[in-house]
Image (cartoon, rainbow, N blue to C red):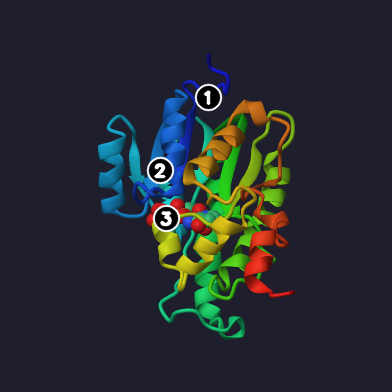
Amino acid sequence: MDFMKLQGKKVLIFGVANRKSVAFHIAETLVSLGAEPIFSVLSDEHAAFCAKRFPNADIHLCDLSQESDIETLAEKMNGDSLNGIVHSVAFASFADGAKPFHNTGREEFLQSMDISCYSLIAIARHFTKALTADSSIVTISISTTKMAAQNYGYMAPVKAALDSVVCFLAKSLGGPEGTRVNAVGASLLKTSSSAGIPGYVAPYLFAEKATIRKKGLRTQEVADVAAFLLSPKSSGINAQTVVVDAGMSVNYFDDEIVGATVDAK
Ligand code: NAD
């Protein structure tokens, strides 16, 4: 039974790099639901990976920091109608390791804002014509942008801007039969981009303990919510960041964590 009503739906997916990518899990989930992914990736290596895993899919190259690349991609795909777009893309240069937040450089901050946030606006603009009635755009944000994790640095303010962009795009692309725009606000996962965050292992292991269920978030759980947001089954959800964190955000006072931190005997 096609409960999710995604059979035959075309979804353009930005952000597959490898088998750990959130975007890869979303693509696999969509295929399992009968949808047809189209890929836009950053490099030949990523394209080769997609070609191997999804031999029937169209695959394009696009550097989202280049307006002309996005424009060219939209022109190339002119005529293709899209039922959905997935934006699962982020970039932050952690080349200098974790720094005090106030030492964030202008260039690195703006580059991250450009690729991780502005790119969604550019994609929406260039693909407006391709999007069908009642289509859906989904981006991947983070579960909280107000937790000042020192190692994550400026990426959180960039994601806060992305969450706001979701609201404004939902309004400007919306209306009767318009396009819905939502984000999945995911907590800590094991992917290659998270592996590049300085000192990620300890916070990741802590996050496992901080979920209510005491088990880390799985990338598939994020992909499932993304698929739901692409599906007409979520038609009542618009302009939201749907938090997927296995309850971590309400669990600061977990007995085990408090007990391991404070000796109140
Ligand atoms: P990933 O490295 O697999 O995916 C990031 C993608 O961004 C890659 O495919 C990369 O090629 C692409 N990208 C970077 N710069 C680009 C550019 N200029 N043009 C086009 N593409 C570009 O890592 P991921 O964890 O799957 O990340 C996907 C999304 O999930 C990101 O938005 C990330 O912030 C978000 N997220 C990840 C976690 C986590 O713990 N890994 C948690 C919450 C949210």
Q: Position of residue 49 (x, y in %)?
A: 28, 45
Left or right, residue 125 beside residue 46: right
Q: Name the N-terminal-most of marks 3 and 2.
A: 2
- Mark 2: which amino acid? Phe
Q: Earlier in the sequence, mark 1 or mark 2?
A: 1
Please state which of the two labelled residues, at mark 1 or mark 3, is closer to the viewer: 3
Residue found at x 55% / y 74%? 109
Q: Nearer the viewer, residue 252 or 193?
A: 252
The numbered mark, 1 or 3, whose residue comes first in the sequence reads 1
| Residue shown at the point (45%, 45%) measured from the top left | 23
Which residue, given by chain and number where applicable, does mark 2 sit on?
24
Q: Which residue is mark 1?
A: 6
Task: Measure how far apart labels 1 and 2 are at the Cα level.
Answer: 17 Å
Whether residue 236 is situated above or below residue 108 in the rendered picture: above
- Relative horizontal placement of residue 4, taking residue 13 as reference (left or right): right
Instruction: Decide if ligand 1 comes within 8 Å of the CB at mark 1.
Output: no
Is residue 117 something one can see in this rendering?
no
Circles 3, 2 touching at the beta carbon (< 8 Å): no
Pick the front one: 10 or 187: 187
Residue picked out by circle 3: 191
Q: Is mark 2 within 8 Å of ligand 1?
A: yes
Specify whether tag 3 is near ligand 1 (CB below 8 Å).
yes
Helix, strand or loop status at disc 1? loop
